Image (cartoon, helix red, strand yellow):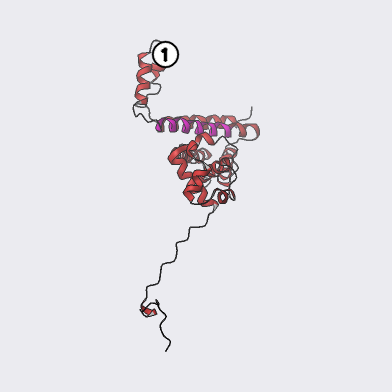
């Protein structure tokens, strides 16, 4: 029998608790970076997103982060494409106009959930999620008779409409003062002599027509205009 070394454990090896292994950090991947970037953008907006902030929250060095993304612009482009992945690509239906409506409604919804996004969609968007949805949009317009210059015009009409509408709504929704719209309505009403048409039309009066209704009516008008754009001159 071998003598027990001084200081050695006296409990039999079979009864000793296995010491926990040191917790390993999850590997740094582009997917983790982009998912956290979207979270930071949702919380703090574009101005609040910095490479230093990302590195700190990922618990990595800035050097490790730069292996995956070179600039903040890279992160923004990837984040925009990421949220477009939440926009379902519909199956082709019998009515191309309905297909456009389904896609554009979901596009608006994604941007309203991420109110920092509308102001960035004007950047060159070459990510796979953006391109797949733009491909569907143009294919639906082609089924509606658009082609050539008319196709480019119709695509821009719809893209500009949904981006502009989402940017306006997102800005309103981010207003810290919930009475901002009421104050705007009161200002116009009090100046009815200077702005008679705005006052009579209910401009900025969301108690008359809400954002969803205005968006849907505007979308129908744009789609009809797109259909006319596809009609030969």
- Give the prevailing secondary structure in the magenta stretch: helix
Give the residue furthest to the right.
Answer: 148
On screen, 229 above or below 91?
A: above
Which of 44/219 is in front?
A: 44
**Stretch in magenta:** 154-177
Q: Quadrant of residue 115?
A: top left
Q: Position of residue 96 (x, y in %)?
A: 53, 40
Work out which residue is located at the far bottom of the displayed protein and give it. Answer: 1
* Vertical position of residue 123 compared to residue 22: above or below: above
Q: Quadrant of residue 213?
A: top left
Considering depth in this image, is 13 or 160 the residue closer to the camera?
13
What element does badge 1 sit on?
loop
Give the image quarter of residue 176: top left
Is 223 contained in the magenta span? no
Residue at which label 1 appears = 195
Is residue 170 on the magenta stretch? yes
Is residue 83 visible in the rendered structure shown here? no
Is residue 150 found left or right of 178 in the rendered image? right
Q: Badge 1 local density, few (<14 within 10 Å), some, or many (20+)?
A: few
Q: Is residue 181 above or below residue 88?
A: above
Q: Residue at coordinates 58% horizontally, 45% vertically from top-left?
A: 127
- Above or below 203: residue 126: below
Q: Quadrant of the C terminus?
A: top right
Q: Nearer the viewer, residue 44 or 195?
A: 44
Point out the residue furthest to the top here.
193
Which quarter shows the N terminus? Answer: bottom left
């Amino acid at each position: 029998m071998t003598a027990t070394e001084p200081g050695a454990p006296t409990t039999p090896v079979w009864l000793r608790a296995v010491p926990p292994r040191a917790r390993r950090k999850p590997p740094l991947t582009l997917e983790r970076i982009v998912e956290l970037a979207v979270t930071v953008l949702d919380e703090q907006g574009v101005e609040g997103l910095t490479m230093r902030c990302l590195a700190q929250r990922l618990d990595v060095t800035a050097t490790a982060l730069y292996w995956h993304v070179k600039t903040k612009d890279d992160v923004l482009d990837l984040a925009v494409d990421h949220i477009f992945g939440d926009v379902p690509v519909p199956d082709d239906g019998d009515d191309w106009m309905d297909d456009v409506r389904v896609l554009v409604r979901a596009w608006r919804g994604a941007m309203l959930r991420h109110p920092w996004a509308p102001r960035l969609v004007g950047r060159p968007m070459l990510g796979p999620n953006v391109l797949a949805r733009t491909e569907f949009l143009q294919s639906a317009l082609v089924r509606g008779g658009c082609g050539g210059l008319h196709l480019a015009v119709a695509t821009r009409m719809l893209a500009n409409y949904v981006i502009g509408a989402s940017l306006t709504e997102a800005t309103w929704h981010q207003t810290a003062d919930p009475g901002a719209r009421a104050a705007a309505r009161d200002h116009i009403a009090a100046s009815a002599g200077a702005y008679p048409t705005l006052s009579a039309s209910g401009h900025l009066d969301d108690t008359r027509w809400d954002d969803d209704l205005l968006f849907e009516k505007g979308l129908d008008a744009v789609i009809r205009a797109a259909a006319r754009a596809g009609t030969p001159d």
